[in-house]
Amino acid sequence: LQESVRSLKMTYKQLTQWYLFRILKHESNNNLALHAIIDINPKAVEQAQQLDIHEGNHAIYGMPIMLKDNINTLDVPTTAGTHVLKDNQTEDAFIVKQMKMHGAIILGKLNLSEWAYFLCSGCPLGYSAIGGQTLNPYGRKIFETGGSSAGSGVAIAANYAAAAVGTETSGSILSPSSQNSVVGMKPTVGKLSRSGIVPISSTLDTPGPMTKNVIDNAILLSAMMGKDLSDSYSKKADQN
């Protein structure tokens, strides 16, 4: 993608618009919809256009990235899939600030197992009251999506964004990555900040990259890293 921009085959604005077109084409069709998306950043195209004016020094620069909807971001509410939080406006989570600092575009928020599957026993994986039932692109209504980062796995498999961020307490990145044939990583707890992410366990929670390939996974991981003084595990990880 970066090579295509450098060779003037496309701009970051056009790339962002292409992903939005693809999302609209599929998600507005009842026979194709995967219900992976909860919300779209209304400023994404404008932000991409601004990035076209400059040059970045990180491979994440200008790339449209989507977030599991339990990760706070300024431009879009953070719902955790529940109606209780449907109007929950927040500041950016620490990892979102890091990505934006490197020039990433936050394209939107992704469906998940409601409350990251923490407050529900026996519910379908990938279902939330806000987003409905996420479906596996390799077999709609046939294969499970895994959870709780179902939308993140589905969105990357369906090519809705350059990369996505999920979160895991116990299997919530690895499960949907496996079910949707994408690359997911649960970093060592503390490698990435948890500040601004709806919590479950202070000793197990972590965000993590979900991508089409290993190289993209490493790029996204590096764009989120940084020492966060408000996360005690982040301090320990940095010292080690």
Image (tube, rainbow, N blue to C red):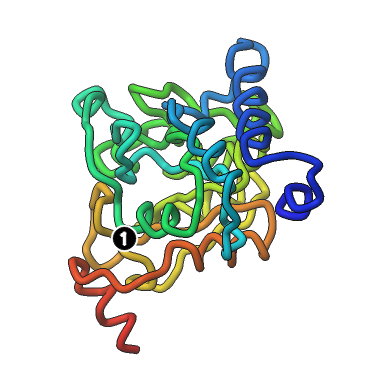
Q: Residue at x 21, y 63 (%)?
A: 202
Residue 34 % position (x, y): 58, 25
Residue 8 occupies which quadrant of the picture? top right
Residue 95 is at least partly visible in this image: yes
For the image, the number of numbered tags is 1
Compared with 114, 195 (above or below) is: below
Q: Which residue lies furthest to the front in this view?
A: 53
Q: Residue at x 29, y 51 (%)?
A: 93
Compared with 178, 30 (above or below) is: above
Residue 191 % position (x, y): 38, 72
Q: Residue 142 or 127: which is nearer the viewer?
A: 127
Q: Residue at x 32, y 42 (%)?
A: 73
Q: Residue 107 or 119: which is nearer the viewer?
A: 107
Q: What element carries label 1?
A: loop
Residue 13 % position (x, y): 62, 35
Compared with 103, 219 (above or below) is: below
Residue 180 occupies which quadrant of the picture? top right
Q: Which residue is drawn at 63% across and 41% down?
A: 12
Residue 143 % position (x, y): 63, 34
- For this view, does 14 lie left or right of residue 99? right
Give the residue at mark 1. 205
Q: How crowded is mark 1: few (under 14 residues within 10 Å), some or many (20 or more)?
A: many
Residue 170 is at least partly visible in this image: no
- Amino acid type, residue under disc 1 in the picture: Asp
